[in-house]
Image (cartoon, rainbow, N blue to C red):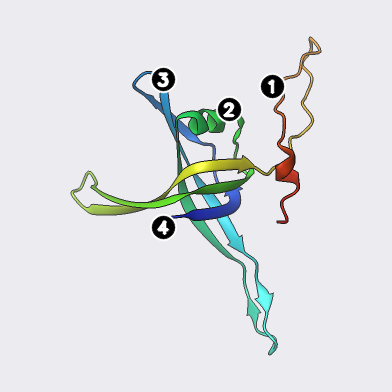
Amino acid sequence: MNKVLLIGNVGKEPEVRYYEQDQAVASFPLATTERGYTLQNGTQVPDRTDWHNIVLYRGLAKVAEKYIHKGDKLYIEGRIRYRSYDDQKGMRRYVTEILAENMEMLTPKQTAVSSPAGQSAEPSVQQDKTTQDLPF
């Protein structure tokens, strides 16, 4: 079984590309952090942050384009994929990506800023109640 579960923060704005008949692919880095701690002998173990390359297709890519921003906290469920390519200098490069199959936004929606016409500047999104009940 190839299954990956991540909770982390978006490292930069999603890069979205469109291909044949309005199909989209989005990619962005996601940072996950293991909190540091102190051992019984007093040794400090620092925080450890890992970066993951997230790839979203079709509908999830369009959601990312509209609603995901740098710093947002996300839950990503997907699978790991390894691939390689030759760069412009002919060097073999290896890439590890997470192909997201499910995504939940964990960052609470901020109060929408009103435009001069009194209309909400951002579309309203109904947050799923199950997101608020997560134990983490």
User: Spatial distance from mark 3 to mark 1, Cα to Cα?
Assistant: 21 Å
Q: Which residue is more in the foreground, 90 or 17?
A: 17
Mark 2, residue position:
66
Figure quadrant of the C terminus: bottom right
Residues at marks 1 and 4, CA–CA distance in whole angstroms: 38 Å
Residue 100, given in percent of the width and then of the height, sits at 48, 43
Residue 126: % across, % down: 72, 29
Looking at the rendered structure, the kind of residue marked 1 is Pro
- Which amino acid does the dot numbered 3 rest on? Asp
Q: Quadrant of residue 122?
A: top right
The quadrant of the rendering that contains the N terminus is bottom left
Residue at screen point 56% across, 54% down: 6
**Disc on res. 22:** 3
Q: Amino acid at mark 2?
A: Lys
- How far across and down, in percent of the image, does residue 20 sit? 34, 21
- Residue at x 48% of width, y 42% of height: 101
Gap between marks 2 and 1 measured at Cα: 10 Å
Q: Residue furthest front?
A: 1
Q: Taking 41 as reference, is 49 left or right?
A: left
Q: Which residue is mark 1?
A: 123
